[in-house]
Image (spheres, rainbow, N blue to C red):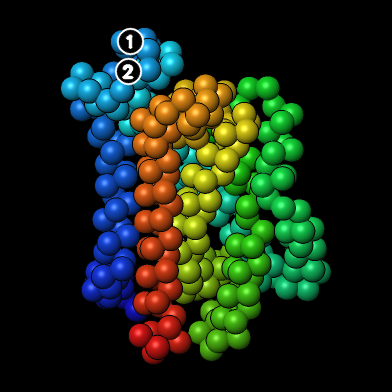
Amino acid sequence: MAVPTIVWVLLTNRRFVVGIALFLAVVLTGVIGPLLYPVDPLSFAGPMETPPCEKYPLGTDTYGRDVLAQLLVGTRTSLYVGFLTALIAMAIGTVIGAAAGVKGGLVDEALMAITNVTLSIPSILLAILIASYLKVRSLEVVAAILGITSWPWYARAIRAQLLSLREREFIYLSRMAGYSDLRLAFEDLLPNIATYIFMAMVLFINGGILGEAGLSIIGLGPTQGVSLGLMLQWATLMEAFRRGLWWWFVPPGVMIVAATSSLMIVSTAMDEVFNPRLRERG
């Protein structure tokens, strides 16, 4: 299916349009928001624990910091971690899955053995274990932790997809033409599963955002800057829920739900569009 045709088919799916529109709204909030509201999210801005008002649209926290400024910068930070997590996980998973699917034999068995061992360990527990040994964790380090603990299922899926394509006639023709395994993978095999790769990227971004929030809430997230997860951690430490400071923990929670829900809607819509069985039921 040609790229323009794929785009047109997706744009005619109402669920995909709603999901991508909501996610783009979250992205624009994180990218453009800090430019339109240039307030330092970590500096003292006004009276402590001020409810939302005209001067402070989302109020201030226990330290007198502007919550709206934290939300805007935190959204950008969490999105950055999500995208970086996706790139790292997909790079590892694509290389291992493609090598196993194309090479076969002992290479396939060795790589899948490593993948299965990693897959048997809960990724969140492995991420917690790694993060707990690091005293300083930058955004890139957190993304790397999440990325290197979440690739196994994707590697197995890529291998399975390539194994199903490896017996196609056009692959035999490419081998007869003298294509190397690397050229075969990147020119013939992977382009044929591009839509699946994109769906996996959506899921990895979702997992990166949720993973950063989860690590931050238990004190194992980034040790500097502002993120949606760190906002929830600060609110938890200061007992914002018990003391009724709803403007401190509700906005980051809503933003996380909006980002992750929109990505799940996009993934579900793409599955409906490109999965023949689901398309027939629809």
CB of mark 1 within 8 Å of CB of mark 2? yes
Q: Decide which of 106, 57 is in the foreground and name it.
A: 57
Q: Report the disc number at residue 50.
A: 2
Q: Looking at the image, how many numbered discs can be counted on the residues? A: 2
Q: Secondary structure at mark 2?
A: loop
Percent position of residue 32, x then y: 25, 34
Indicate the position of residue 210 as horizontal and vertical percent values.
52, 46
Query: Which part of the image, by quadrant, shows the N terminus?
Result: bottom left
What residue is drawn where x is 35% and y is 85%? 282
Residue furthest left as drawn: 54
Asked if residue 19 is positioned above or below residue 133 in the image, the reply reads below
Q: Is residue 80 shown left or right of residue 46?
A: right
- Answer above or below: position of 49 versus 71: above
Residue tagged by mark 1? 47
Q: Quadrant of residue 279?
A: bottom left
State whether residue 83 is above or below residue 189: above
Question: The residue tagged with tag 1: helix, strand or loop?
Answer: loop
Q: Is residue 179 visible?
A: no
| Position of 179 relative to 262 (above/below) | below
Amino acid bearing label 1:
Pro
Q: Give how far across and how far down residue 176 sits, in percent.
A: 58, 82
